[in-house]
């Protein structure tokens, strides 16, 4: 019988489950970064916006789902979430938020040196050294989680049908 359904070739390895020690270390890093962000004065809403923007750039459906719900719980509006990718074209985001999001984008796509320098200059004008460091760490961490979820193909399930 030559049935290929469910074969190793079409099934992704959930790297978080396959290598739990490494994944646990990433979770611990995320917890330390969350504390660093709070200590720097970044509110949960701004951290979630950074998580969402980086996840948009990377195309990580799983992380977009998780962090959209987290942003809404933190008080974010549907309107701002709907225009997050085009935030430069609206007046809905503060200069501080735009600076943090630009820096997160530059952290996610560091190969564009000119864009990175511009984003850093804007960040320097609106954010403290501690805030800059925290934003960069938040972006680095969500980039790592994006890669885990994208390469593992973590599913986004309908909340009414998912099993915990």
Image (tube, rainbow, N blue to C red):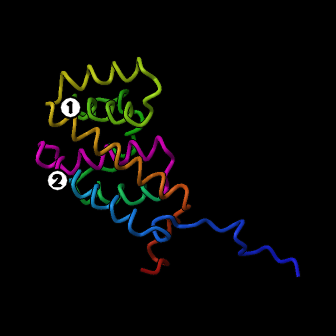
Q: At which x and y percent is residue 138?
A: 29, 45
Task: Look at mark 1 in the image and give the residue it sits on.
Answer: 96
Assign a secondary structure to mark 1.
helix
Label 2 crowd bin: few (<14), some (14–19), many (20+), radius 10 Å:
some
Q: Which residues are magenta?
A: 36-61
Q: Which mark is residue 35?
A: 2
Query: Measuring 48% from the left and 52% from the top, which residue is drawn there?
Result: 147
Location of residue 127 by image quarter: top left
Rendering coords of residue 83 (x, y %): 39, 39
Q: Judge whether 81 appears above or below 153 on screen.
A: above
Q: Is residue 117 left or right of residue 157?
A: left
User: What whole-number distance in Å separates the C-alpha atoms at marks 2 and 1?
Assistant: 19 Å
Q: Nearer the viewer, mark 2 or mark 1?
A: 2
134 above or below 109? below
Query: Which image quadrant: the C terminus?
Result: bottom left
Q: Which residue occupies 23% across, 50% down?
A: 33
Task: Give the left or right position of residue 141, taking residue 47 as reference.
Answer: right
Q: Can residue 79 be seen here? A: no
Up-down relation of residue 92 to residue 159 (above or below):
above
Please state if 53 lies on the left or on the right of 162 as rendered.
Answer: left
Nearest the viewer among 162 and 117 is 117
Front residue of 143 and 69: 143
Q: Position of residue 64 (x, y in %)?
A: 42, 54
Q: Quadrant of the N terminus?
A: bottom right
Disc on res. 42: none
- N-terminal label among 2 and 1: 2
Magenta residue check for 103 = no
């Amino acid at each position: 019988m030559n049935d290929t359904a469910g074969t190793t070739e079409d099934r992704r390895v959930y790297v978080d489950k396959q290598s739990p020690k490494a994944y646990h270390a990433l979770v611990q890093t995320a917890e330390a970064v969350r504390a660093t962000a709070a200590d720097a004065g970044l509110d949960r809403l701004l951290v979630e916006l950074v998580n969402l923007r980086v996840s948009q750039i990377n195309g990580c459906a799983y992380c977009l789902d998780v962090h959209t719900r987290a942003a809404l719980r933190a008080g974010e509006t549907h309107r701002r979430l709907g225009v997050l990718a085009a935030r430069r074209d609206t007046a809905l985001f503060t200069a501080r938020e735009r600076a943090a999001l630009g820096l997160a984008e530059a952290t996610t796509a560091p190969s564009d040196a000119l864009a990175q320098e511009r984003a850093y200059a804007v960040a320097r004008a609106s954010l403290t050294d501690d805030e800059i460091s925290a934003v960069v760490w938040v972006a680095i961490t969500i980039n790592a989680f994006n890669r885990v979820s994208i390469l593992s193909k973590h599913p986004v399930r309908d909340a009414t049908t998912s099993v915990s």
